[in-house]
Image (tube, rainbow, N blue to C red):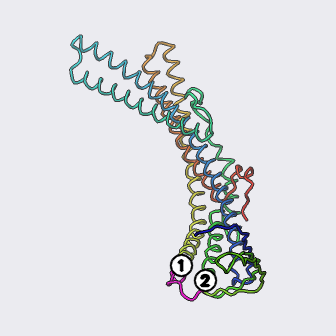
């Protein structure tokens, strides 16, 4: 007849690695390096976020002014269409002229809707970037001051020169690659020694109960305590360690090649970006002259209107020209600031990094 009994059983053991060919130490080192890499990625993330917030804000202002211009242009074409319809009614304009006026007006309305939709999209992006609620387009200005490139350029040239004159120009992106190479070297070492014997210190204690008779008259407890040194030596793992070693070496070589390419490209990118900033500074100078001319033309046209020497439509055309000049200057300024931010990002001299607690290590 089956019978059941209660018994006390336990088995406690401890295992302390004594020698693992340096894999434990290297594993701890790799974990610390990975933490440092993530800190570097946080630093790069702040730079990317700052650049996106800035450029999105500039785009919103530029598109806000473009919407104003598009509405003015639509108003002018609507007046032209109304005049053409009246002429057609008086048989002073052809069907072709009326069709062209209607087509131009409708196309301007479509263009206005496209610009407004793009503006709203950028405002939504801006709100998400800042974690804030959407704001109406009227909350944003219609223009911004052009860059003061005359004071900017000496500072940017000094930053680029100081960065390029260092013995080993580097930024967080390159430092992260160097750290990843060290991690891969540790991984390769672990794969090399995977089939070597390892030594551990073991200790433990065990207790159990049993009986050797059918009637369970003779029942006894037994326990033992042990300590010693164990050696574990895997002989064959189906070539798994060899395959992992080859894959690790391939990743290591790829990172080493990527590091060299990034180092070679960094100095060239800094120099090219500085040249681009200088070229855009000259473009801003030209656009400022165009804007000044458009402002003078509008002022003169308004004076002529007050004297009765021109029409209201001429003033609207002058205002449209001023909007075009302002938008062109803002567009050039946008690219100037974008290139300037790229230079500060490459050299990691952006003031935003003063608030990021993860310096290059």
Left or right: 348 in relation to 330: right
State the residue position of label 2. 194
Left or right placement of residue 212 versus residue 81 in this view: right
Within the image, what quadrant is residue 166 found in?
Answer: bottom right
Q: Nearer the viewer, residue 13 or 8?
A: 8
Q: Position of residue 312 (x, y in %)?
A: 45, 17
Disc 2 is placed on an element classified as: loop
Q: Indicate whether 133 appears above or below 211.
A: above
| Quadrant including the N terminus | bottom right
What's the CA distance linking mark 1 and mark 2? 10 Å
Q: Which residue is mark 1?
A: 244
Q: Position of residue 357 (x, y in %)?
A: 75, 54
Between discs 1 and 2, the one toward the N terminus? 2
Q: In front here: 100 or 19?
A: 19
Q: Is residue 351 above or below residue 102?
A: below
Identify the residue shown where x is 60% and y is 83%.
Answer: 194
Q: Which residues are magenta?
A: 234-244
Quadrant of residue 77 in the image? Answer: top left
Q: Is residue 65 above or below residue 172?
A: above
The structure residue drawn at horizontal position 60% and vertical position 43%, both measured from the top left corner, is: 53
């Amino acid at each position: 007849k089956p019978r059941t009994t209660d018994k006390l059983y336990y088995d406690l053991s401890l295992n302390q690695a004594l020698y693992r060919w340096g894999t434990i130490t290297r594993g701890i080192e790799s974990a610390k390096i990975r933490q440092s890499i993530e800190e570097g990625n946080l630093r790069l993330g702040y730079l990317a976020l700052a650049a996106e917030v800035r450029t999105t804000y500039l785009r919103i202002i530029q598109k806000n002014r473009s919407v104003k211009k598009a509405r003015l242009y639509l108003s002018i074409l609507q007046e032209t269409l109304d005049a053409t319809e009246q002429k057609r009614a008086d048989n002073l304009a052809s069907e072709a002229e009326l069709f062209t006026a209607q087509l131009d007006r409708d196309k301007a309305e479509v263009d206005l809707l496209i610009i407004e939709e793009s503006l709203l999209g950028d405002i939504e992006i801006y709100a998400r970037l800042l974690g804030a609620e959407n704001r109406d387009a009227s909350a944003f200005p219609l223009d911004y001051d052009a860059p003061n490139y005359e004071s900017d350029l000496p500072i940017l040239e000094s930053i680029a020169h100081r960065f390029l004159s260092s013995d080993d120009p580097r930024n967080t992106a390159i430092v992260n690659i160097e750290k990843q190479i060290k991690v891969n070297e540790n991984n390769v070492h672990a794969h090399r020694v995977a089939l070597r014997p390892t030594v551990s210190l073991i200790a433990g204690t065990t207790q159990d109960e049993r009986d050797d008779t059918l009637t369970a008259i003779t029942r006894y407890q037994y326990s033992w305590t042990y300590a010693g040194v164990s050696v574990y030596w895997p002989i064959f793992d189906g070539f798994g360690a060899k395959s992992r070693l080859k894959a690790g070496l391939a990743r290591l070589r790829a990172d080493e090649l990527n590091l060299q390419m990034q180092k070679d490209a960094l100095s060239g990118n800094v120099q090219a970006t500085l040249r681009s900033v200088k070229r855009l500074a000259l473009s801003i100078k030209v656009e400022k002259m165009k804007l000044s001319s458009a402002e003078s033309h509008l002022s003169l046209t308004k004076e002529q209107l007050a004297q009765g020497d021109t029409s209201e439509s001429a003033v609207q055309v002058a205002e449209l020209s001023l909007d075009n000049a302002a938008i062109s200057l803002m567009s050039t300024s946008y690219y100037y600031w974008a290139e300037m931010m790229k230079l500060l990002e490459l050299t990691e001299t952006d003031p935003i990094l003063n608030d990021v607690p993860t310096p290059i290590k």
